[in-house]
Image: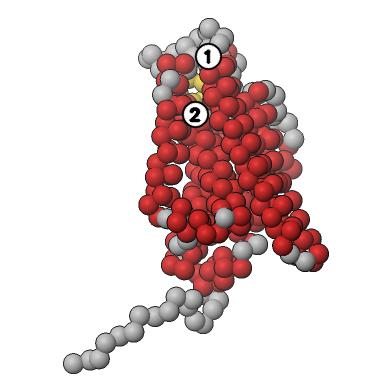
Amino acid sequence: MSTHNHTHSGVLTFLLPSLPGPGGPGLLTILGLTYGTTLLGNGLMLLTICANTYLHQPQFLLLALLATTDLGLALSMLPTILDALWVPVPTISRDVCLLQMCCLYAVSSGQSSVLLAMALDRWLAVCHPLYYLAFFTPNHLAWTSLAFILRAIITLLPTPWLIPSCSVHNLSLPFCFPTEVLQLSCGGLSWTYPAVSMLTTASLDIVFITISYCLVFWEVMKRISPVGQRKALRTFTAHLCALLAFYGPLFASSLFPGSLPGSLSSLALLASPALHPLVYGIQSHQLRRGLLDVLGCLSTSRVAPVPKGPHH
């Protein structure tokens, strides 16, 4: 197997595991369904928000950013997963592996940032409604998005110099996850950079997200009736499950790279993008109506038509 991991004309290659691998066709079927749910759910949510102008509000624009990062994560993994399914001995070159690794790293960082912004959005909207509209303006949202992009870029800068150059590169995942690829470094220490930076960033986000949602939950529970409290508890539990589905596999993949079979690791990383449209999208009445508008199931539009002037 190691014969495939050498340099051809100066181009370093990595050997990917073939799928389905451990777990068989059953796990592969679940992976396919999860992929379909991720692409369809997030694609429809993004299309719904873009097509309906009454959804162009901070809360839904953040959902659009979340759907974009979900699609980015799924599409970044897709090419090599397809290679692992169809090619008998799947390989990936060093440059393509570096590109995929940077995409996964940036998308994961961006997704964590968007989840933090969504938590702060709900905290301001519920606990400080007078300041909400003043803070979450389109201008502030644009600057916040730029800050998220810069945070991902800055942490990515050293990675091209950390990618390994040894002779043996057998990956356990059907994609180039940063900590696993850099763990193969000859020096043996460069994998700690993405692990520490990713975990530090995610840990800080988790702290602020937890504080924000706890404050929102406490404020809501003080105001509403027992029936409303049960509904709020179900919503809070659904959001908690979505957060665990994202941060759980992210921490596991960073701390223990290659500890799970390829198809199972792919399924774990795709669980969060598949859940987001269900947790954040379907429970919103405005998004459901907007989706029906997009699908042509409503006879009238939610957007008031612009009155036409008199004909001359």
Position of residue 166 in the picture relative to residue 18 (left or right): left
Amino acid type, label 1 = Ser
Q: Is residue 75 visible?
A: no
Depth order, front residue of 46/96: 46
Which residue occupies the extreme right position in the image? 226
Label 2 Cα neighbours within 10 Å, binned few <14 / some 14-19 / many ≥20: many
Residue 302, position as x, y percentages in the image:
49, 76
Position of residue 201 in the picture relative to residue 34 (left or right): left
Q: Is residue 19 above or below residue 287?
A: above
Front position among marks 1 and 2: 1
Depth order, front residue of 277/128: 128
Depth order, front residue of 113/216: 216
Depth order, front residue of 17/70: 70
Secondary structure under the numbered disc 1 in the rendered image: loop
Residue annotated with mark 1: 190
Residue 44, position as x, y percentages in the image:
53, 60
Callouts 1 and 2 close, C-beta under 8 Å: no
Q: Is residue 248 visible?
A: yes
Residue annotated with mark 2: 101
